[in-house]
Protein backbone atom coordinates (compact mmCIF):
# COMPACT_ATOMS: atom_id res chain seq x y z
CA UNK A 1 0.00 0.00 0.00
CA UNK A 2 1.49 3.34 -1.00
CA UNK A 3 2.00 5.98 1.65
CA UNK A 4 0.03 9.01 0.50
CA UNK A 5 -0.93 12.50 1.54
CA UNK A 6 -4.52 13.66 1.31
CA UNK A 7 -6.28 16.94 1.96
CA UNK A 8 -9.47 17.34 3.98
CA UNK A 9 -11.57 20.34 4.86
CA UNK A 10 -14.27 20.44 7.52
CA UNK A 11 -16.90 22.77 6.10
CA UNK A 12 -18.36 25.69 8.11
CA UNK A 13 -21.32 23.75 9.51
CA UNK A 14 -18.96 21.40 11.36
CA UNK A 15 -17.29 24.30 13.14
CA UNK A 16 -20.65 25.95 13.89
CA UNK A 17 -22.15 22.72 15.27
CA UNK A 18 -19.07 22.21 17.51
CA UNK A 19 -18.29 18.90 15.81
CA UNK A 20 -14.64 19.51 14.93
CA UNK A 21 -13.37 17.28 17.74
CA UNK A 22 -15.68 14.40 16.83
CA UNK A 23 -14.67 14.42 13.19
CA UNK A 24 -10.97 14.73 13.96
CA UNK A 25 -11.32 11.80 16.38
CA UNK A 26 -12.69 9.59 13.60
CA UNK A 27 -9.79 10.47 11.34
CA UNK A 28 -7.24 9.87 14.10
CA UNK A 29 -8.84 6.64 15.28
CA UNK A 30 -8.64 5.18 11.78
CA UNK A 31 -4.88 5.62 12.03
CA UNK A 32 -4.25 8.49 9.65
CA UNK A 33 -1.54 10.92 10.75
CA UNK A 34 -2.56 14.57 10.89
CA UNK A 35 0.49 16.36 9.50
CA UNK A 36 -1.04 19.85 9.06
CA UNK A 37 -4.13 21.45 10.60
CA UNK A 38 -5.56 24.96 10.71
CA UNK A 39 -8.74 26.95 11.23
CA UNK A 40 -9.09 29.42 8.39
CA UNK A 41 -11.50 31.74 6.62
CA UNK A 42 -11.22 31.20 2.90
CA UNK A 43 -12.01 33.91 0.37
CA UNK A 44 -14.15 33.43 -2.74
CA UNK A 45 -11.06 33.26 -4.92
CA UNK A 46 -9.59 30.30 -3.06
CA UNK A 47 -13.00 28.61 -2.81
CA UNK A 48 -13.60 28.96 -6.56
CA UNK A 49 -10.12 27.69 -7.38
CA UNK A 50 -10.45 24.76 -5.00
CA UNK A 51 -13.71 23.64 -6.64
CA UNK A 52 -12.77 24.78 -10.17
CA UNK A 53 -13.71 21.39 -11.68
CA UNK A 54 -17.34 22.19 -10.83
CA UNK A 55 -17.40 25.68 -12.38
CA UNK A 56 -20.58 26.10 -14.42
CA UNK A 57 -22.59 23.45 -12.56
CA UNK A 58 -25.83 24.58 -10.96
CA UNK A 59 -24.54 24.00 -7.42
CA UNK A 60 -21.17 25.74 -7.91
CA UNK A 61 -22.03 29.26 -6.72
CA UNK A 62 -24.00 27.94 -3.74
CA UNK A 63 -21.11 25.67 -2.81
CA UNK A 64 -18.65 28.57 -2.96
CA UNK A 65 -21.00 30.74 -0.86
CA UNK A 66 -21.36 27.95 1.67
CA UNK A 67 -17.69 27.21 2.20
CA UNK A 68 -16.91 30.93 2.52
CA UNK A 69 -19.76 31.52 4.99
CA UNK A 70 -17.62 30.86 8.07
CA UNK A 71 -14.33 29.33 9.15
CA UNK A 72 -13.31 25.90 7.90
CA UNK A 73 -10.75 23.47 9.29
CA UNK A 74 -8.17 22.50 6.68
CA UNK A 75 -5.84 19.56 7.17
CA UNK A 76 -3.35 17.26 5.53
CA UNK A 77 -3.33 13.61 6.51
CA UNK A 78 -0.75 10.97 5.77
CA UNK A 79 -0.94 7.19 5.71
CA UNK A 80 -1.17 4.04 3.63
CA UNK A 81 -3.75 4.62 0.90
CA UNK A 82 -4.66 7.87 2.66
CA UNK A 83 -6.66 9.21 -0.29
CA UNK A 84 -9.12 6.32 -0.60
CA UNK A 85 -9.19 5.70 3.14
CA UNK A 86 -10.27 9.26 3.83
CA UNK A 87 -12.90 9.09 1.09
CA UNK A 88 -14.28 5.92 2.68
CA UNK A 89 -14.46 7.61 6.07
CA UNK A 90 -16.37 10.51 4.48
CA UNK A 91 -18.93 8.39 2.63
CA UNK A 92 -20.84 9.10 -0.56
CA UNK A 93 -21.23 12.61 -1.96
CA UNK A 94 -25.04 12.44 -2.00
CA UNK A 95 -26.32 12.42 1.54
CA UNK A 96 -29.12 9.99 0.71
CA UNK A 97 -26.43 7.52 -0.39
CA UNK A 98 -23.98 8.13 2.47
CA UNK A 99 -24.12 5.11 4.75
CA UNK A 100 -24.49 5.32 8.53
CA UNK A 101 -21.04 5.02 10.10
CA UNK A 102 -19.53 7.41 7.57
CA UNK A 103 -19.00 11.07 8.40
CA UNK A 104 -21.54 12.25 5.83
CA UNK A 105 -23.89 9.41 6.68
CA UNK A 106 -23.88 10.42 10.32
CA UNK A 107 -23.66 14.23 10.15
CA UNK A 108 -24.89 15.56 6.78
CA UNK A 109 -28.47 16.28 5.78
CA UNK A 110 -28.00 18.21 2.50
CA UNK A 111 -25.67 17.28 -0.34
CA UNK A 112 -24.61 20.90 -0.85
CA UNK A 113 -23.60 21.12 2.83
CA UNK A 114 -22.15 17.63 3.11
CA UNK A 115 -19.87 18.65 5.98
CA UNK A 116 -16.45 17.54 4.73
CA UNK A 117 -14.28 17.70 1.63
CA UNK A 118 -11.69 15.03 0.85
CA UNK A 119 -9.37 14.85 -2.15
CA UNK A 120 -10.49 12.40 -4.83
CA UNK A 121 -7.01 11.36 -6.03
CA UNK A 122 -3.31 11.68 -5.36
CA UNK A 123 -2.92 14.44 -7.95
CA UNK A 124 -5.86 16.48 -6.67
CA UNK A 125 -4.52 16.05 -3.13
CA UNK A 126 -1.22 17.53 -4.24
CA UNK A 127 -2.96 20.47 -5.92
CA UNK A 128 -5.25 21.14 -2.96
CA UNK A 129 -2.48 20.88 -0.35
CA UNK A 130 -0.58 23.49 -2.36
CA UNK A 131 -3.58 25.80 -2.37
CA UNK A 132 -4.11 25.69 1.41
CA UNK A 133 -0.66 25.10 2.91
CA UNK A 134 2.92 26.15 2.41
CA UNK A 135 5.45 23.28 2.46
CA UNK A 136 6.83 24.40 5.85
CA UNK A 137 3.39 23.89 7.45
CA UNK A 138 3.52 20.13 6.86
CA UNK A 139 5.06 18.35 9.82
CA UNK A 140 5.72 14.64 9.44
CA UNK A 141 6.07 12.74 12.72
CA UNK A 142 6.87 9.27 13.91
CA UNK A 143 4.62 7.46 16.37
CA UNK A 144 6.72 7.43 19.56
CA UNK A 145 4.59 4.58 20.96
CA UNK A 146 6.09 2.26 18.33
CA UNK A 147 9.29 2.18 20.37
CA UNK A 148 7.48 0.78 23.40
CA UNK A 149 5.36 -1.94 21.84
N1 LIG B 1 -25.81 17.40 -7.19
C1 LIG B 1 -25.33 18.23 -6.26
N2 LIG B 1 -26.13 19.14 -5.66
C2 LIG B 1 -25.65 19.99 -4.73
N3 LIG B 1 -24.39 19.99 -4.30
C3 LIG B 1 -23.55 19.09 -4.85
C4 LIG B 1 -23.97 18.17 -5.86
N4 LIG B 1 -22.91 17.40 -6.20
C5 LIG B 1 -21.89 17.84 -5.45
N5 LIG B 1 -22.26 18.85 -4.63
C6 LIG B 1 -21.44 19.57 -3.68
O1 LIG B 1 -20.22 19.87 -4.29
C7 LIG B 1 -19.14 19.26 -3.58
C8 LIG B 1 -18.15 18.76 -4.57
O2 LIG B 1 -18.75 17.71 -5.34
P1 LIG B 1 -17.90 16.44 -5.79
O3 LIG B 1 -18.61 15.87 -6.96
O4 LIG B 1 -16.47 16.84 -5.91
O5 LIG B 1 -18.12 15.44 -4.58
P2 LIG B 1 -17.08 14.96 -3.51
O6 LIG B 1 -15.73 14.79 -4.13
O7 LIG B 1 -17.67 13.81 -2.79
O8 LIG B 1 -17.07 16.18 -2.50
P3 LIG B 1 -15.81 17.08 -2.07
O9 LIG B 1 -15.10 17.51 -3.33
O10 LIG B 1 -16.43 18.24 -1.30
O11 LIG B 1 -14.99 16.17 -1.23
C9 LIG B 1 -19.80 18.17 -2.73
O12 LIG B 1 -19.08 17.97 -1.52
C10 LIG B 1 -21.14 18.75 -2.45
O13 LIG B 1 -21.08 19.63 -1.33
MG1 LIG C 1 -14.66 16.36 -5.01
Image: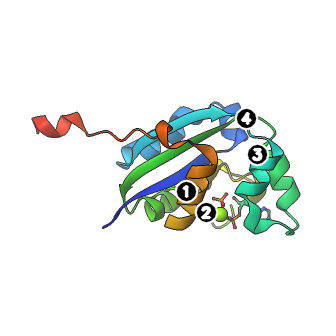
Q: Quick check: marks 1 and 3 in contact, CB under 8 Å?
A: no
Confirm if mark 2 falls within 8 A of ligand 1.
no
Element on which disc 2 rests:
loop
* Above or below, comparing residue 18 to residue 118 in the picture: above
Q: Quick check: marks 4 and 2 in contact, CB under 8 Å?
A: no
Tag 1 residue:
90
Number of other residues with Cα within 10 Å of mark 2, as a class: few under 14, some 14 to 19, many 20 or more: many
Please report whichever mark, 1 or 4, sits nearer to the chain's N-terminal start.
4
Tag 2 residue:
98
- Camera-nearest residue between 12 and 50: 50
Drawn side of residue 67 relative to residue 27, left or right: right
Residue 90 position within the rendered picture, expressed as x and y whole percent measured from the top left: 55, 56
Tag 4 residue:
41
The CA span between labels 4 and 3 is: 9 Å
Which corner quadrant of the image does residue 19 belong to? top right
Drawn side of residue 140 relative to residue 6, left or right: left
* Above or below, comparing residue 94 to residue 43 in the picture: below
Please report whichever mark, 1 or 3, sits nearer to the chain's N-terminal start.
3
Element on which disc 4 rests:
loop
The CA span between labels 1 and 4 is: 22 Å
Please report whichever mark, 4 or 3, sits nearer to the chain's N-terminal start.
4
Label tally: 4
Please report whichever mark, 1 or 2, sits nearer to the chain's N-terminal start.
1
The CA span between labels 4 and 2 is: 27 Å
The CA span between labels 1 and 2 is: 8 Å
Q: Residue at x 49, y 46 (%)?
A: 76
- Camera-nearest residue between 26 and 106: 26
Residue 132 position within the rendered picture, expressed as x and y whole percent measured from the top left: 62, 45
Tag 3 residue:
67
- Say if residue 63 shows up in the picture: yes
Is label 4 or label 2 in front?
A: 4
The CA span between labels 1 and 3 is: 17 Å
Amino acid sequence: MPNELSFAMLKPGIVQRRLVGEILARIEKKGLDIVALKLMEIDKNLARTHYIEHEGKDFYNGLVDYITSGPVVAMVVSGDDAVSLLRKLCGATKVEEALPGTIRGDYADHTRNNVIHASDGVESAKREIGLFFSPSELIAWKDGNDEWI
